[in-house]
Image (spheres, rainbow, N blue to C red):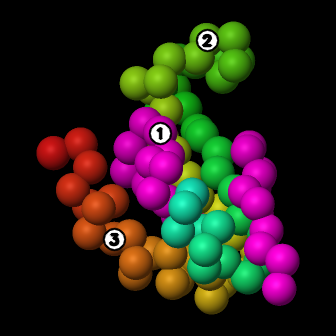
């Protein structure tokens, strides 16, 4: 079975906030090994004063998300990574 590679700036149906400014490599490695559907990651600005996200980009003003086509992949990802995600930014 061929594994799907991640998609940068993808947005699928099931999204999980990482609770960090970036996506740790461990999250991508987990997805490469365990996901059966498409998956990816994207960022949203947390600063309401930012107009064009790409023009006014500041990593401290963003929240990273993992995104999945299959709900099963999203739930398994959440349970496998919840401890590390809850310890971010402490």
Q: How far apart in space, not on screen, are marks 2 and 3 (Cα)?
A: 30 Å
Q: Which of 71/23 is in front?
A: 23
- What segment carries the magenta color? 1-27
Q: Which mark is residue 22?
A: 1
Q: Residue at x 66, y 77 (%)?
A: 35
| SS type, badge 1 | loop
Q: How far apart in space, not on screen, are marks 1 and 2 (Cα)?
A: 17 Å
Q: Which image quarter holds the N terminus?
A: bottom right
Q: Which of 5/21 is in front?
A: 5
Task: Give above or below for 73 relative to 59.
Answer: below
Q: Are marks 2 and 3 in contact (CB under 8 Å)?
A: no
| SS type, badge 2 | loop
- Residue 89 is left or right of residue 26, and the answer is left
Q: Position of residue 59 (x, y in %)?
A: 47, 24
Residue at the spot of label 2: 56
Q: Position of residue 10 (x, y in %)?
A: 77, 51
- Mark 1 or 2: in front is 1
> What is the quadrant of residue 45 in the picture?
top right
């Amino acid at each position: 079975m061929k594994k799907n590679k991640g998609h940068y700036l993808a947005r699928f149906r099931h999204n999980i906030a990482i609770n960090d400014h970036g996506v740790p490599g461990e999250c991508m490695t987990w997805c490469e090994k365990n996901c059966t559907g498409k998956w990816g990651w994207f960022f949203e600005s947390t600063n309401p004063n930012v107009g064009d996200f790409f023009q006014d980009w500041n990593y401290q003003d963003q929240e990273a998300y993992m995104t999945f086509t299959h709900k099963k992949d999203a739930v398994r990802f959440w349970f496998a990574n919840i401890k590390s995600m809850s310890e971010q930014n402490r």
